[in-house]
Amino acid sequence: MIKRMFWMMAIVGAAAGALYGLKAYVARQGAAFVSAAGVPAQTVSAAKARIDTWQPRLEAVGSLRAVNGTDLSLELAGIVQEIGFHSGDRVQAGQVLLRLWADDDIAKLRSLEANAQLAQLNYDRSVRQLKAQTISQATLDSDAATLKSNAAQADQQRALIEKKHLRAPFSGRLGIRQVDLGQYLAPGTTVATLQSVDPIFVDFPLPQQAIVQIAAGQPVRARIDAWQGRVFPGRITAISPKVDSSSRTFQVRAALDNPGGLLLPGMFAAVEIDAGAPQRLVTLPQTAITYNSYGSTVFVVDEKSRDSKDRPRLVARQVFVTTGPTRGDQVAILKGVDEGDTVVTAGQMKLFEGASVAIDDSVRPLDDPDPRPQER
């Protein structure tokens, strides 16, 4: 029994050893094959680092507002007798836009004017009588006071009648009419809006560190999403002398030319301001940068040698870079990459130090310093 057990274990051990040896042989042969074949090159896209001239600029988001704008109304109540405008009209300062019924006020004015005329006659008569020494100075003074009182009452009534006329306080364009003939208007009822929009203001905030980069009269450019592709020029007219303590920003106002009335109060505007002298910077597409907690890196493609067919062998080299400002799809490289270096712009996630690469630029990442949305 012991002998049979010994021979059985020997046979099992020999079989296990043979199996292990076979596996080791296969593994060695596979490694040798892979080593002979080499690691396949990784296909990536790449671009040459180039130097571009960038104009430093400040960017902000603002809102348009009229130079003069108000909702027109009357301070007296009354019934609309006449409307002298249409919705959307352009009007001049002082133009009468609306009248309220004022017949009883006009009649009262005539009565007061008659009293004032009588007081004038009495005063003139008293002056002549005083020269003839038939009345006292006190009588003349009383007549003079009566004349002034009656004249003032007539002026007050004229002012009351004038308040029943709505006049344009400034030149501009009217909005939608909100009242009708014969309608009773309470004091303060909005008749229409009046906006003066040429030029038009744009108000926008800037961070406090930008205070040294702007000044009154500096040119600005505004883009409005309602007018794609158009740039509206203007100039800074005012800078707030106060910084908001909660946001650490200050307000800036610029005036934009608006001869065609294309820009309307309340519109959103993207504002750009050139600040400082142009700079020459090395730029790359933003897709070339790999951002990590320990720093930003790129893969630079180097030519190491040539094969039997005189084709260059390209190898990836990972380098740390210092990035600067961005413009659209581009980023400035302050340190780490020189002009003319070939940098991987897509496919770097599958690379490692010393990896072989093959460049295929049939599909290139976006590299536009001023991209614009496009509707398909």
Image (cartoon, rainbow, N blue to C red):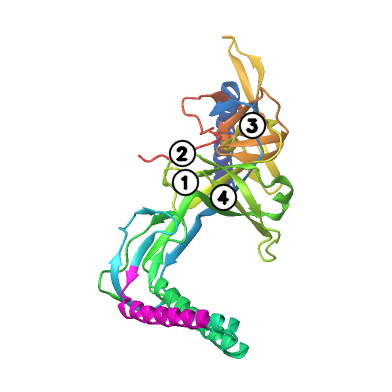
The residue sitting at 57% across, 89% down in the picture is 135
Q: Secondary structure at mark 1?
A: loop
- Is residue 185 in view? no
Amino acid at circle 2? Arg
Between residue 347 and residue 231, name the one nearer to us.
Answer: 231
Q: Horizontal and vertical percent for residue 351?
A: 60, 34
Task: Classify residue 227 by image quadrant.
Answer: top left
Which residue position holds label 1?
Answer: 224
- Cα separation, mark 3 vs mark 1, equals 28 Å
Task: Classify residue 89 by image quadrant.
Answer: bottom left
Amino acid at circle 3? Thr
Q: Residues within 10 Å of mark 2 (few under 14, many from 20)?
A: few
Q: Residues within 10 Å of mark 3 (few under 14, many from 20)?
A: many
- Cα separation, mark 4 vs mark 1, equals 94 Å
Relative to 49, say whether 205 is above or below.
below
Q: Horizontal and vertical percent for residue 171?
A: 45, 54
Which residue position holds label 2?
Answer: 230
**Sequence order check, earlier mark of 3 and 1:** 1
Amino acid at circle 4? Met
- The extreme front residue here reads 132
Q: Horizontal and vertical percent for residue 142?
A: 56, 88
Instruction: Give the magenta range.
Output: 99-125
Which residue position holds label 4?
Answer: 5
- Cα separation, mark 1 vs mark 2, equals 8 Å
Relative to 71, say whether 145 is above or below.
below
Label at residue 283: 3
